[in-house]
Amino acid sequence: MEEAAMDSVEMSGSISQPGVAEVWETVTAALVSPGCSESEQNLSDSLALLCDQGLGRLLGGWLLETLQMRLSSSVVPEFWSGLKQPENELEERGRAWVLLTTFRTLLERLEPFLVGLERLGTWQDAGHGGLRGPGPGGLQDRAFTIIRALLLFSPAPVLQERVLEFYSRTFSVYINQEGEAEDGAEVTDGPEGGVCPGCGAQMQQCWCQEALTQLQELSYILSKLQLLEWVSSEAVTSILHKLIEQRMEQHCRGEYERSFLLEFQEWLELVLGWLSKVFASEADRDAPVDAPSTPSIPSVPSTPSVQAGQSASSVLKQWRCHMHQFFCRIYVNMRIEELFSIIRDFPESKAAIEDLKFCLERTNQRQQLLTSLKSAFESRLLHPGVHTSDILTVYISAIKALRELDPSMVILQVACQPIRKYLRTREDTVRQIVAGLTGDAEGCTDLASELSRGDPVTLEMQDSDEEGNDPEDWTPDPTDAVPDKTGSKRRSSDIISLLVSIYGSKDIFIDEYRAILADRLLHQLNYNTAREIRNVELLKLRFGESHMHYCEVMLKDMADSRRINSNIREEESRLGEEEQPPLSLSAIILSSEFWPSLKEEKLELPAVACQAMEAYTHRYEKLKAMRTLSWKPHLGSVTLDVELEDRTLTNLTVSPIHAAIILHFQDKSSWTLEELSGKLGAPKELVHRKLALWQQHGVLREEAAGRYYVVETGSSKEKMERGVMLIDSDEERDSNTTTQSEQREEKLQLFWAYIQAMLTNLDSMTLDRIHSMLRMFVATGPVVTEMDVNELEAFLQRKVREHQLMVSAGVYRLPKAN
């Protein structure tokens, strides 16, 4: 403004010369009065005179300063006053008319100045009278800057409120006319009671066409004043964001089984038709909009801007990119909230995963997804109220879903780390995994089908350090990858490999499978091992033949037992009736070195059973020279008939101790608990628990002083009920093998013996040295027993608490004897 003031002073001094003032008035009147009648010749001569006096260069500054003064004094106050009047206007139609009228009045007030600036710029370009300057473009740019600065420097909220309301209504009208009046959409009202779904008025008072005409005129005025971006962009952005969020909630929330990308693309083209009316420029208001054949979504994080002279098609391309970007961001936010449910429902939710993958690649929200998913796992899955099988089911679904979402498997590796860590704390994790592999787990068929698929990935391949891939196919890991495994190994890991890697060693799974296989084989009554043979063959493809050797020996024992039983039965059939054994006995003959540790219980069987076992052993020794049998009397099953006075219970299959109990009642009608316990050589607590089975089925009853009697007669109702009852085993089917924790405790005691010997010889050792020496020297069972550093440290700390070890500064030593 200092320069303008100096120009004014210079101008005043120059105009004081005779004749120059009249010429100045003539030229300025022609610039601000479009209806001026001065001829072009007179104006040219006047301009030449002004330029000779050095006043031609002041015309532009004078005109802009006059525009600024007029804006400040009357135009801007009139604009805001007109926009706020009348204050008691209630109808939306009237408010739209006030908005349009206000901008009409603004254009009328500024039109003379815009025409004058254009005329002056034309004179400058043509060089009338030697006039020089920036031309019409430069002058008008400065004028529009002044208009925006004074008009919108501190805008009242009423402007955005009116513009937002008007654009919302025109959008509703446009969508209704294009045939997309959606059910439940908040931007439209249903056609109830003769109400127009577009404008919301009564049908006889519908103003839909008027609203679209007003939109076209408003866009023309704003474009002419170069206010389109400044007035419309914020309102349009607010409307579109709200519409996308509403549409997402109504159509996508909780719906995982179908894709929404194509549907959104179709809806977007409809919205762009409305935007083409909002941002129609004076030059190309009807310019066509290029519609991409596929959703291509570049990253445009900010709101599109309308530059001067920019075509409508280029503006709409920016808006399309902005809407795509916002859709992707909102969609990813919504699916991140629902990702736990999407994973749980996979593969039914595969469409949602594919859409999420498409949108996630176009937004920078991977870290947000990782943080949210880890939190969801920890709060909804990893707590004592969830069964281990359910945790494994969700983990398997997560492997499948996240592999689809991120083929590099980095998201899987990071997000599922809490699951893997938590599963290591569950005692039954290994048993549940192995049961799933063999098809014994209820409701979990994924592992069994994974085991039997046609192209298994062997764990030896997983452990190999050689990648063996073509260097041309190498792709770098994402920046958020955990650098503990190479990318190719991570991508090639299948479900079974990932589950086995929870513990870092496959040996623990093989040991558990041996225990489960032993249980299944020992409960077999017909030596049928077809299913187990199939499972072992499939596991050999995964774990390698050498690791499954002990299982093959166990299956061979079953086949040998069947053959030996057939031979002994054939030999018994040739004996006379007097030489026949008192009981028909079949045995499962185990190679003790190859089977898991079996439970040890004391049990003395009745004499008739002992005689049958001795006869069987004698015949076995004849078949297998230099070999004998060591019986496990508490294992197996007995099939017997119980004959009572008024009823007979046939084909009852019970455990050996149950059979021993009832056989003793054949010799004596009543027994006390102490007598039975002494006769059987078993603890009283065990005998008391086993007696309950015969009490439940009405064979025995307990009377005073803890004496048990046989119930020879029962009521007719009891006869009818028990006549159809089938007893196949004890009330609880205990495992015949020791549990994993029991086996682990035995191995820990073996470690303890080695640790004591090392500390006795070396006096003191650090944790790492103890661990390295144990790995070198300790080997037991079918495979090398392994213990990681954390487990060893926990074991040593337990010994410290039991005062069997001392530790100081990380060095362990044995306590000194008193």
Image: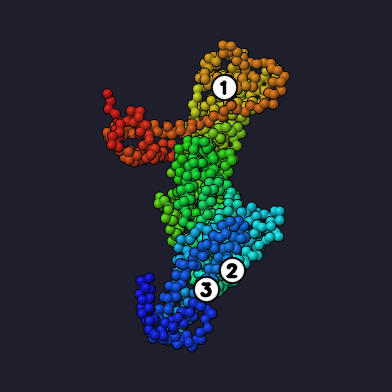
At horizontal 56% and vertical 13% (from top left) the residue drawn is 706
Q: Give the side of residue 309 with respect to residue 583, left or right.
A: left
Callout count: 3
Query: Considering the numbered disc 2 on the image, is that residue within a helix, a strand or a loop?
Result: helix
At horizontal 50% and vertical 54% (from top left) the residue drawn is 406
At horizontal 57% and vertical 47% (from top left) the residue drawn is 345
Q: Which residue is mark 2?
A: 217
- Quadrant in which the N terminus is drawn: bottom left
Task: Characterize the local packing of mark 3: few (<14), some (14-19) or many (20 or more) Cα atoms within 10 angstroms.
Answer: some
Marks 3/1: CA–CA distance: 107 Å
What is the x, y in percent for residue 106?
Answer: 53, 68
Q: Amino acid at mark 1?
A: Lys
Task: Characterize the local packing of mark 2: few (<14), some (14-19) or many (20 or more) Cα atoms within 10 angstroms.
Answer: some
Given residues 615 and 204, the one toward you in this image is 204
Query: Considering the numbered disc 1 on the image, is that residue within a helix, a strand or a loop?
Result: helix
What is the x, y in percent for residue 399?
Answer: 51, 48
Given residues 319 and 53, the one toward you in this image is 53
Q: Which residue is mark 1?
A: 690
At horizontal 51% and vertical 41% (from top left) the residue drawn is 380
Q: Residue furthest top?
A: 705
Q: Amino acid at mark 3?
A: Glu
Q: Which residue is mark 3?
A: 111
Precedes in sequence: disc 3 or disc 2: 3
Precedes in sequence: disc 2 or disc 1: 2
What is the x, y in percent for residue 606?
Answer: 56, 19
What is the x, y in percent for residue 531?
Answer: 59, 40
